[in-house]
Amino acid sequence: MTWAFVVIAIAKTIAAFVLLLGVTILLVWFERKVIADMQARIGPNRWGPFGLLQTLADGIKLFFKEGLRPRPADPWTFAIAPVAAMVPSLLAFAVVPFGHEVTIAGHRIFWTLTDLNIGILYFLAMGSLGVYGIVLAGWASGSKYPLLGGVRSSAQMISYEIALGLSIVPVIIASGSLSTVSIVAQQGGSIANVNAFNGIPVLETIAHWFRFLPNWYIWSQWPAFILFMIAGVAETNRAPFDLPEAESELIAGYHTEYSGIRFALFFLGEYVHMVVISAIGVTLWFGGWHGPVFWHGWGDWLWPFVWFMVKVTIFLYTFVWLRATLPRLRYDRLMWLGWKRLLPAALTWIVVTAVVNTPDIPRYYRFGVFGILFLMVIAWIGRGDPRLREAVVPQRHLGPRPITTSRGLDS
Amino acid sequence: MSLPAYFPILLLTILAGAFAVVSIFVANRLTPRRWTDVKVEPYECGITPEEMPERERFPVKFYLVAMLFIVFDIETVFMYPWAVEYKALKAFGLAEMGTFIGILLAAYVYVWRRGGLEWAE
């Protein structure tokens, strides 16, 4: 390790930390604004232009609020839990490549904190560590609602952790690498260059027609992406999987007893986790920082970063959109979805991807297996829960849905 | 790729940990601390809380979920090195993993049939 390496590492760490916190603070504002818009409200508009500084004001307020600790709580565990919840979700960002590279004073600097050869495993490991903070918070509060919330939340997170882990495996098969940087690098260029299509008359022609499309993994791996997205939303405890914070049942779940800055840390951890899940989704399926460069010359190095941020923003918008749209799942339905649908679906997709990517099986067999398995899974997933199929729901006309206009609610 | 690759992670751990710990510490110094008996009672919708049995264990159902998690998460971990080397292993890798997934699938079907994955009746 040279001095230049150390200095660059320190600078990159601070930059990544500030970037992540900045995005998170903007995300809280963004979520409130978007949800307000979807509910025909105005949302925060007092502090700063468009209410941009609202989160900062809230943060400062929380900072100066009295921190309480319930009498039966375990003091040390109670104090450690918020830190244990926030730090791992921040750490997971270390392997995300958020831009290409830039040369400063002869040093080539890659826009990622570090390029681990086990990057994806590291991301999953940090996701698993995040469960500790929640379990400890629920247990240490010495109160009933946090205990129930913490236990529920941990069961949910570990259940969806499996689906999350398995949904990434097919992308790893296709890319042959666990390093996020090389996975992104493989997604450069046009879809017409994909090897899998070479020599297959029809597919080759179609790929040639759509050669303006980038070579992202989303085209071949979209089932894996759907699984990842569902599991990712559940992993971050967001609606419709926000059971741990089901306020009608559990007040605020595991952080019921937390106030002031300690609550702010939990809150921060959850939102950072959202940003990180979005960033990993962009990295694995949507080509990371790849995107068209509209003009060369000044600001070449900025394009990748801009594209990365645009993609992450679309992901975050989806998270917010889901929250505004979908009602919360019942707990047994949640476990049903995780264990009985996502897990087998992810395993099937792994087998399908493996078969398609085996070079020494004749190609037409491979695509035959692919088609049959794929149709089977679609049919099986579409079957739904037998308990639901048997229930007879009387169909009746409920009248037109309320339609929002710029003036407010019209029905 | 060697140990220096982990150096930035160490730095980020220190930075994130310090951020959390220092902000809690500073907030503790700056905020008022006027605790009363009512304030430090565990929250229970405004009624006088019922005493909870000290440090009770978690419900057994969650224990079962945790056990299943360990089984399937280890499966996931095994799949990663296999997935990285898949294109080199070719049909041999497919057969190997097919056997592994097959054995695990048998266990999965068994757990399903025995009702291990049912949450509520």
Image (spheres, coloured by chain):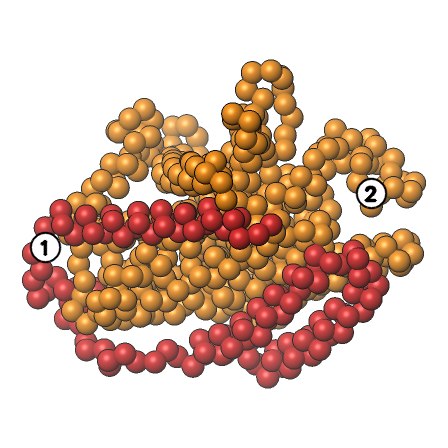
Q: Position of residue A325 (x, y in %)?
A: 47, 46
What's under tag 1, amino acid-wise? Arg
- Disc 1 and disc 2: Cα gap in Å? 66 Å
- Give B21 or A228, whichever is nearer the viewer: B21
Badge 2: few (under 14), some or many (20 or more) residues near its Cα, within 10 Å? few
Q: Chain B: what color?
A: red
Q: To which residue does mark 2 refer?
A: A195
Q: To which residue does mark 1 refer?
A: B33
Q: Position of residue B102 (x, y in %)?
A: 73, 74
Can the viewer see residue A274 in this picture? no
Q: Chain of mark 2?
A: A
Which residue occupies 92% across, 56% down?
A362
Q: Chain A: what color?
A: orange
- Give B91 or A102, whichever is nearer the viewer: A102
Does the CB distance between marks 1 and 2 fall below 8 Å? no
Q: Are the residues under badges 1 and 2 in a single subunit?
A: no
Q: Chain of mark 1?
A: B
Which residue occupies 63% across, 52% down?
A178
Can the viewer see residue A46 in this picture? yes
Look at the picture and state if A124 lies above or below B71: above
Which residue occupies 59% across, 84% down?
B114
Look at the picture and state if A33 lies above or below A226: above
The count of marks equals 2
Does residue B105 appear to the left or right of A139 in the view shown? right
Snapshot quadrant of residue A22? top left
